[in-house]
Amino acid sequence: MIKTNFKKVYAAFVILAVTLFIGCSHEHEHDSNNAEHEHSSISITQYTDSTEIFMEYPALVINTEAKFLIHLTDLKNFKAVTEGVLTVEFINQKGTKFSIIQAEPTRAGIYTPVVEFIKPGKYKMTITLTGKQVSDIIIVNNLIVYSNESEIPHEEEESSSSISFLKEQQWKIDFKNEPVIKRKMEKSVVATGEIKAKSALFSKVVSPIEGVVLSKNNESLKPIGSFVKKGDVLLNISPSADASFSIQKIKNDFHLAESEYERAQNLFNKKAVSRKRLEEAKFDFEAKQASYNSLIDQIKITENGFAIIAPISGHIENKEFVLGDHILSGQELFTIINPHRLVLKANVPSSQFEAANNSTDASFNVEGINSEFRISNMDGKKISVAASLNETNRTVPVYFEFSNPKNKIKVGMYAEVYIKVGGTNEYISIPESAIVNEDGLHTAYVQTEGEVFEKRILKTGIINNGYVQIISGLKVGEMVVTVGAYQVRLAALSPESAIGHGHAH
């Protein structure tokens, strides 16, 4: 007779198997009277598009109750399945079938149906989950049911360096895995970099005059971070007597030189003066005009004195004075940066310079922004290469200019740069987030079963679009941990430091 009730208490199963599918081993326990065999549980790990199943069950013998521990993970977020009706159907090779229904998980993520088989043989197990969180059908083939315990094969347990990290622990942290695959990648030269302001969009504003910054004349002074347009008033300065005289003299000298040049031109046209005299008047006028234009580009006369105006449009980044200060001629007042267009300075290792010099494109990551930027996708281009080598770090600066999307990228940010130097090929690769640096070695953690992991030492190659080429250490199809690898490492170093303890079901 087949029993469909669920036991409330059963022995805990702790899985240390290293195979991806079904494995069976045994261990011997001795007492003073006799020796008997105890068979370890069998474990299965499978994936569908929406669900991971990790299932444990004892060796199956007819007329003996067997408790199945079915761990279900929602692959949308790698968290426990917390609701849904589970229907488990078994069918043998002769077509005999029966099913069991469990209305909800015994606890989050775990269903525990108890089954008793009455006929030996191979069974197909169909698991149907129906719920708002996940609905799925999972098929497990070739479950073997034995006539008696003596038929169960015994295998010597092999030593293993596997890491146990339980489902209950995985569900409590940010965790994700994905299969190792081949991706199209571009060969790149890796370089360090820094975001710089474009010279034409960067200005240090200095005072052309001496004077005092009076509070009453600067009540609408703009704060740091404000955006100003070219020509906007930045600051009003009440000039000293000497400053007023100097400004007036520059203005008068310009107008005098302008008049003299016009007079010399008229006389030359009448052949009343020589060409040399005309050229002298022109030279003097242009010199006085340059001084005057420089002045009016920086200041204009207002009712509050002389106003310092913005030479470019941009954001005020620094302010080097306080209200009430006495300002000297030539003193720095503001820094203005327009971040609409920026420059990426890439410090290329001298050994890779030739390839980088021939490149026309690059991508880069910056601190604090979880995305990769590509120069060619940002209306960008390579603008120059330094003529000399930095003797301290043996690098050659290569410069790229680009448009700054929504001003997200900030001047002064450090960047990791990938200068494109080759064609596109397919390589085994994994996300950069899967790689853990351990004592200078690149490592990753492979999930060989639902709760079993292995550390792999990697040999890596090119980096492209957030992925790293794997030359050795991983195979296509293996499930590598891409989020939560550091916690798996902690579990390997010290099981006590892992989240949660025990595996009682």
Image (cartoon, helix red, strand yellow):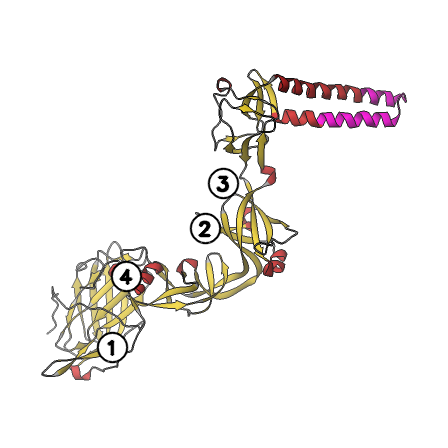
Quarter of the image containing the N terminus?
bottom left
Q: Which mark is residue 366?
A: none
Lower position in the chain sequence, tag 4 or tag 2: 4
Q: Mark 3 falls on what kind of element?
A: helix
Q: Nearer the viewer, residue 134 or 56?
A: 56
Image coordinates of residue 263 in percent, x first then y, are 82, 19
Image coordinates of residue 170 in percent, x first then y, are 28, 59
Q: CA distance from mark 1 to mark 3?
A: 59 Å
Q: Which mark is residue 24?
A: 1
Image coordinates of residue 155 in percent, x first then y, are 25, 81
Q: Amino acid at mark 2?
A: Ser
The residue range painted magenta reads 262-289
Q: Residue at x 22, y 65 (%)?
A: 70
Q: Mark 2 falls on what kind of element?
A: loop
Lower position in the chain sequence, tag 4 or tag 1: 1
Lower position in the chain sequence, tag 1 or tag 3: 1
Q: CA distance from mark 3 to mark 4?
A: 44 Å
Residue holding disc 3: 407
Q: Mark 4 falls on what kind of element?
A: strand
Disc 3 + disc 4, Cβ < 8 Å:
no
* Residue 448 picture quarter: bottom left
Magenta stretch containing residue 72, yes or no? no
Between tags 4 and 2, which lies in front? Answer: 2
Residue holding disc 2: 371
